[in-house]
């Protein structure tokens, strides 16, 4: 890991109670962490952090035993900056660069927590005020102690997904079995959840809906947009519009045929089936 000493920092700290997640307000790109580190190096920088993470690497700027200026009250905390522009659709947190960065950051959080014996739990504002130890965002520190008004890492930050990565608890990848050209029901309901549902089954289902002419991103993540399309499809095919892809909806995705215009009855032909 590269070390680029930040200009601004305080004295030593002998315990860590909080790991604080930040957003840099800079692009989520490889090399982004080094750029922010260079900024922290300059005497004109207003603050610092212990670590900066981008999709490709982690740069350290202040030693963990030293106070960094990231979210006051700073003593007893470790600050981790994630390279993110802090604007745009919250779906950006699910692109490949953000996902790579979240994974690096999750590993880092786990290591820092282990060194300082910090519990791997996300803290509420009330818990921060009562002195509980754990993981939080800059926004939570702002609300709990009122010494800054920063709201990073932002309302779109995928806390559920991130904490699952920190806890190493991501579900096993879902396999989709194709039989007679039809993907078989993978055995789980696709629905909006936290952490957000993702996997091959979601992607396979999205691709089929897209092929059926629905406007849907084939990104393998089941978010509100996928739920809206599911609802529309369920309505169109006479299923209960739940917005959740259960077994019946999954099967209808492949079996449904658009209604054919009725042939005009031919005179003189007796329909034996009647
Ligand atoms: Zn911040």
Image (tube, rainbow, N blue to C red):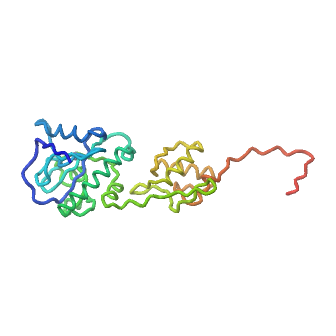
Q: How many marks?
A: 0
**In the foreground, 2 or 184:** 2
Asked if residue 183 lies left or right of residue 110, the reply is: right
Point out the residue furthest to the front here. 1
Spot occupied by residue 259 in the image (x, y as percentages of width and height): 70, 47
Spot occupied by residue 65 in the image (x, y as percentages of width and height): 11, 55
**In the foreground, 73 or 27:** 27
* x 54%, y 51%: residue: 205
Asked if residue 60 lies left or right of residue 239, the reply is: left
Asked if residue 215 lies left or right of residue 6, the reply is: right
Quadrant including the C terminus: bottom right
Spot occupied by residue 37 in the image (x, y as percentages of width and height): 19, 41
Point out the residue furthest to the right here. 268
* x 13%, y 51%: residue: 63
**In the foreground, 94 or 55:** 55
Spot occupied by residue 123 in the image (x, y as percentages of width and height): 25, 59
* x 68%, y 47%: residue: 258
Asked if residue 233 lies left or right of residue 32, the reply is: right
Q: Residue 159's image quarter?
A: bottom left
* x 32%, y 58%: residue: 163
């Amino acid at each position: 890991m590269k070390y680029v000493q930040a200009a601004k920092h305080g004295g030593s700290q002998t315990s860590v109670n909080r790991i604080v997640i930040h957003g840099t307000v800079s692009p989520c790109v490889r090399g982004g962490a080094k750029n922010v580190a260079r900024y922290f190096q300059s005497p004109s920088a207003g603050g610092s952090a212990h670590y900066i993470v981008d999709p490709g690497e982690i740069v350290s700027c202040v030693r963990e035993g030293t106070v960094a200026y990231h979210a006051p009250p700073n003593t007893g905390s470790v600050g981790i900056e994630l390279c993110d522009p802090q604007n745009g659709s919250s779906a950006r947190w699910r692109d490949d660069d953000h996902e790579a960065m979240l994974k690096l950051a999750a590993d880092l959080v786990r290591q820092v927590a282990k060194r300082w014996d910090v519990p791997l739990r996300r803290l509420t504002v009330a818990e921060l005020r009562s002195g509980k130890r754990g993981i939080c965002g800059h926004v939570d520190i702002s609300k709990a102690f009122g010494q800054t008004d920063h709201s990073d890492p932002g309302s779109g930050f995928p806390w559920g997904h991130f904490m699952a990565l920190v806890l190493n608890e991501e579900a096993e990848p879902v396999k989709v079995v194709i039989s007679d050209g039809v993907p078989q029901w993978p055995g789980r309901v696709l629905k909006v959840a936290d952490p957000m549902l993702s996997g091959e089954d979601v992607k396979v289902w999205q691709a089929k809906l897209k092929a059926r002419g629905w406007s849907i991103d084939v990104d393998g993540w089941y978010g509100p947009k996928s739920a809206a399309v599911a609802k529309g499809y369920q309505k169109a095919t006479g299923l209960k519009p739940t917005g959740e892809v259960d077994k019946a909806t999954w099967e209808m995705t492949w079996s449904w045929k658009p209604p054919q215009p009725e042939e005009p009855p031919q005179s003189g032909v007796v329909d034996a089936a009647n």
